[in-house]
C-alpha cells in the first residue's frame, strides 16, 4: 500500500534548518536582526524602493494592523468577498466595523469591480480584494472605483506570492496595504507568519508601533539604539503581533527559493491542465499573458457530466490515497456570518455555485512527477475516465 499523499506540505531545506539552529544558538530567538533582514529582503524582492515591509506573526494580524492603521472602526463598512477564509472578514469585526459581503466572478472566484461598486454605501471605508488561489483580481478597475469613492484598499494577498498583475508584482500596486501569509501551507512559509506591505510611511509607522504593544520603538531598536535599553514609551494599546527571529530565519531562505517554487508550481499547473483536458472538469482560470499566477491552489470544479458529487469525489480520492480540500466554504454559509448578517445563498449565486462543485487538488513543490501522476490516475479513476 502506497503512502497517503497529503493535500499540502511545506518544502523546508537544510538552509532553513541551519538558520533556525543559528538563531537558537545565538540566544536571540524573538524579533531581532533576522526579522529585520527578512523585511529588507522582502522589500527588495518586491523591487519597489517605496515599499515598506513589516513582518508579523500571521496574515490575520497583518490584516488587522492594516485596517487599524486606516482608522477603521464602529459604523464603518468594509467590503469583502464571501469566497474567502474567515480571517479576511474577522479582522473587520475586531475593530467593531461591519463586513459587507459580495459575490465573485464565476471563472476566477475573485471579487469584481462590478460587485464592489454595487455594495458601496456612504459608510464604505475600505475594500479587501482577495487574489483567490494566486490569480490577481481585476485591480485596475477595483483601484479606479476605490479612488473615485475615497475608499481604502487592503489586498488580502495570502495566496498571491508571487503574483503579477499586468507586469507588476502584487504588493507594488496602488493600494494602501497588501498582506501576505507565511502559514504552513502557503507558497512560502515561516511556520506561522505574515508580511504587511505599504508605500505610506505614516501607515507603516503605525503598524510597527501597534504590532508590539503600542511601544514607540521595537525591541531590536531598543537594544541597539543610543537611548538607555530600559526606556520605552507606550503611545497606544497595541497588540502582540511581532514575528520572532526563529520564524524569520525560515523566511529568509524560503524567500530566496520563491522564484524557483513559482516556476515549479506553474509547471505543475500546466501538467494538470494538459492531463485533465477533455475530462468533465472545469479547470482553474488562467492568467492573461502579462499576469503571473502564484498557483497556491489548483481548484477544479466537477461538471454535471462527471456524475459524482463533490463530497463523494473527495471521499473516493481519499480512498485512493490522495488528500483533497475545498476552497472555500463561503462565509455566507458559516453560522456566525450567516446569522449575524442574514446572508443567504441567493445573495451570492456565483460563489455558491462554485462552492458546491469545487475541489482543490494537491499542488506543492515537494510533490514529484510520480505523485502528480498518482493524482491524475486517481482523478480519472474516480471520474470513470481511466
Ligand atoms: C491563509 C489565509 C489567511 C490567513 O493567513 P494566516 O497567516 O494564517 O493568518 C487570510 N486570508 C486568506 C484568503 C487565506 O487563505
Image: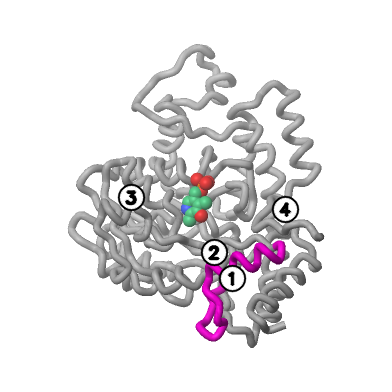
* Mark 4 sits near ligand 1, with its Cβ under 8 Å away: no
Q: Give the range drawn in magenta.
A: 300-321
- Can residue 52 be seen? no
Mark 3 / mark 1, whichever is N-terminal = 1
**Is 185 on the left or on the right of 222, as rendered?**
right
First of labels 4, 1 by sequence position: 4
- Residue 231: x %, y % from top left: 47, 14
User: Looking at the rendered structure, which numbered label has been put on residue 336?
Assistant: 3
Question: What residue is disc 4 on?
Answer: 257
Label whose residue precedes the other's in the sequence (1 or 2): 2
**Numbered disc in front, either 3 or 2:** 3
**Residue 278: percent from left, percent from top:** 64, 87
Using the numbered discs, state the Cα–Cα distance from disc 4 to disc 1 in whole angstroms.
34 Å
The correct choice, above or below, for 82 with respect to 90 in the image is below
Q: Which of marks 1 and 2 is in front?
A: 1
Q: Residues within 10 Å of mark 1 (few under 14, many from 20)?
A: many
Residue 133 disc label: 2
Disc 2 vs disc 4: which is toward the camera? 2
Callout 1: helix, strand or loop?
Answer: helix
Locate residue 376, reporting x and y percent: 71, 74
Decide which of tag 4 and tag 3 comes sooner along the chain: 4
228 relative position to 16: left or right: left
Task: Indicate the quadrant containing the C terminus: top left, top right, bottom left or bottom right.
Answer: bottom right
Which mark is drawn over residue 313? 1
Residue 103: x, y in percent?
Answer: 35, 68
Q: Residues within 10 Å of mark 3 (few under 14, many from 20)?
A: few
Front one among 129 and 6: 6
Amino acid at each position: 500500500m502506497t503512502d497517503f499523499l497529503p493535500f499540502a506540505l511545506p518544502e523546508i531545506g537544510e538552509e532553513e534548518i541551519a538558520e533556525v539552529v543559528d538563531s537558537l544558538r545565538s540566544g536571540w530567538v524573538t524579533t531581532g536582526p533576522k526579522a529585520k533582514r527578512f523585511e529588507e529582503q522582502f522589500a527588495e524582492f518586491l523591487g519597489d524602493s517605496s515599499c515598506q515591509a513589516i513582518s508579523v506573526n500571521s496574515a490575520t494580524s497583518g490584516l488587522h494592523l492594516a485596517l487599524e492603521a486606516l482608522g477603521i472602526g464602529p459604523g464603518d463598512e468594509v467590503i469583502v468577498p464571501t469566497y474567502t477564509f474567515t480571517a479576511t472578514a474577522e479582522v473587520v469585526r475586531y475593530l467593531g466595523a461591519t463586513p459587507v459581503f459580495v459575490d465573485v466572478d464565476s471563472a476566477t472566484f475573485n471579487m469584481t469591480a462590478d460587485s464592489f461598486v454595487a455594495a458601496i454605501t456612504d459608510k464604505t471605508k475600505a475594500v479587501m480584494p482577495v487574489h483567490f488561489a494566486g490569480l490577481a483580481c481585476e485591480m485596475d478597475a477595483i483601484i479606479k472605483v476605490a479612488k473615485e469613492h475615497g475608499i481604502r484598499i487592503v489586498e488580502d494577498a495570502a495566496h498571491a506570492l508571487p503574483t503579477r498583475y499586468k507586469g507588476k508584482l502584487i504588493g507594488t500596486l496602488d493600494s494602501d496595504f497588501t498582506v501576505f501569509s507565511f502559514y504552513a501551507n502557503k507558497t512560502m512559509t515561516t511556520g506561522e507568519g505574515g508580511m504587511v506591505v505599504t508605500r505610506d510611511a505614516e501607515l507603516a509607522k503605525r503598524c510597527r508601533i501597534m504590532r508590539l504593544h503600542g511601544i514607540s520603538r521595537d525591541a531590536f531598536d531598543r537594544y541597539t539604539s543610543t537611548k538607555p535599553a530600559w526606556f520605552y514609551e507606550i503611545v497606544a494599546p497595541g497588540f502582540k503581533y511581532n514575528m520572532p527571529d526563529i520564524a524569520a530565519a525560515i523566511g529568509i531562505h524560503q524567500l530566496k527559493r520563491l522564484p524557483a517554487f513559482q516556476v515549479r508550481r506553474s509547471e505543475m499547473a500546466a501538467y494538470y491542465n494538459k492531463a485533465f483536458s477533455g475530462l468533465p472538469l472545469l479547470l482553474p482560470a488562467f492568467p492573461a499573458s502579462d499576469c503571473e499566477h502564484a498557483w497556491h491552489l489548483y481548484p477544479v470544479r466537477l461538471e454535471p457530466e462527471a456524475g459524482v458529487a463533490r463530497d463523494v469525489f473527495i471521499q473516493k480520492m481519499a480512498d485512493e490515497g490522495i488528500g483533497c480540500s475545498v476552497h472555500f466554504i463561503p462565509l455566507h454559509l458559516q453560522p456566525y456570518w450567516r446569522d449575524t448578517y442574514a446572508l443567504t445563498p441567493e445573495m451570492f449565486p456565483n460563489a455558491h455555485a462554485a462552492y458546491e462543485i469545487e475541489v482543490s487538488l494537491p499542488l506543492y513543490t515537494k510533490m514529484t512527477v510520480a505523485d502528480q501522476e498518482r493524482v491524475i490516475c486517481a482523478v480519472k479513476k474516480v471520474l470513470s475516465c481511466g
